[in-house]
Image (spheres, helix red, strand yellow):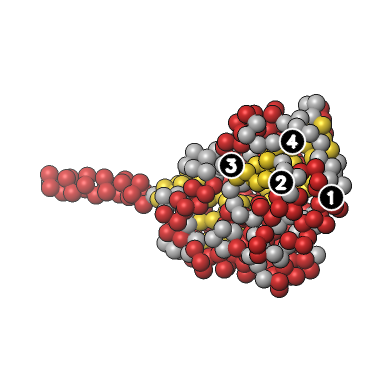
Amino acid sequence: MKLFAFAAAGLAMAVAATPALAQTKLKWAHVYETPEPYHTEALWAAQEIAKRTNNKYQVDVFAASQLGNENQINEALTLGTVDIIYTGVAFAGSIHKPIAISNAPFILRDFDHWKAYRDSKLFTDIASGYEQKTKHKVTALTYYGQRHLTANKAINKPEDMKGMKLRVPPAPLYLMFTKSVGANATPIAFAEVYLALQQGTVDGQENPLPTIMAKKFYEVQSHIMLSGHITESLLSIVGGHVWNKLSADEKTIFTDVLKTAASRATDQIRISEQNLAAEFRKLGKTVVDVDRKPFIAAAAPLHNDASAGAGWSKAEYDTLQALK
């Protein structure tokens, strides 16, 4: 009788322990602030993944460069020390150049052109090339917004940027824009930009309006130029060490959830960037409506120039331009 009771107790303990043993914890790393839609939607996605997999996967989201800057979290994905990341297409482009095509200055006409690219076979094919090279899985593309210039002076034409020390992200393709206007590119990690502006290490920076607000760059810059020179995107990428262990149903769940999170964040960012110019004016900032035509004319000749950072085929470029 005692033996039976002991065995039954042991079985009960084993059953109770099973869910904990079966749960897999995943780390999602990014460099953005906690109030931003990228983070809030990542938290939503983490809850959805847990719910749809019966708590088999617990995704912990690490914001604001807690697990490293953007280059470091890309490396960590390859090392398997983080499992999911947001990363700008320019950073992914340092591994597979074509995936950065949408980051060339003025290569996208507007938000609708960006959406057409997101939903296109061209994007799927280019992402497949990245996946073959890295063994990681690209699950979604999120709109990051049009990048605009900030400085402590007005910039109205490309010549106004000649010799300017402009902070750009430490990814090769950003040099195409600085080259087109004759600025001096100064790559600085995202978390260090505010201090670099405050101390005068750089003369200006460029980011979408929601990021300029979230990171409070306007506190240390007097002018915001609505240049819209780059339409920025973030990739949601699941590490190959995780993706290859998922069942077919789990892959569908992860893809559906991450795409939905990307779409939700995209909608919020689009609304935010449309309203923020007025908000910056209320804060006493000088907001400059830039004539983009001279900037476009300066950048367009570099779009297929490998020495300026282009790493896509002419056919890929032409397909992108033809999207409606």
Instruction: Name the residue beneath numbered marker 2.
Output: 183
- Going from N to C along the chain, the mark reached first, 3 or 2, is 2
Which mark's residue is nearer the viewer, 3 or 2? Answer: 2
Q: Earlier in the sequence, mark 1 or mark 4?
A: 4
Of callouts 4 and 3, which one flags the residue occurring earlier in the amino acid sequence? 4
In the rendered structure, the answer to whether residue 207 lies left or right of residue 45 reads: right
Q: Where is residue 159 in the image (x, y as percent from the top left)?
A: 81, 46
For image coordinates 81% across by 36% down, the residue present is 154
Q: Where is residue 148 in the image (x, y as percent from the top left)?
A: 75, 43
Q: Which SS class for mark 2?
A: loop
Q: Nearer the viewer, residue 7 or 123?
A: 123
Horizontal arrangement in the rendering, residue 299 relative to residue 191 (left or right): right
Say what amino acid the circle numbered 1 marks: Arg
Residue under label 4: 151
Sequence-wise first label, 1 or 2: 2
| Res. 188 mark | 3
Residue 139 can be seen, yes or no: no
> Callout 1: few (<14), some (14-19), or many (20+) C-alpha neighbours within 10 Å?
some
Q: Are marks 4 and 2 in contact (CB under 8 Å)?
A: no
Question: Residue 64: x and y, percent?
Answer: 55, 38
Q: Distance between the residues labelled 1 and 3?
A: 26 Å
Q: Which residue is drawn at 54% across and 47% down?
A: 70
- In the picture shown, does residue 197 fall above or below 313? above
Q: Residue 175's spot in the image, x, y percent?
A: 66, 52
- The answer to the question of whether label 4 and label 3 lie on touching residues, with beta carbons closer than 8 A, is no
Residue ID for mark 1? 292
Rendered image: mark on residue 52? none
Instruction: Give the residue displayed 64% in from the left and 29% down from the top.
Output: 198
Q: In which quarter of the image is residue 156?
A: top right
In the image, what residue type sits under mark 4? Ala
Pointer 1 with pointer 2, Cβ within 8 A? no
Q: What residue is drawn where x is 80% and y is 55%?
A: 298
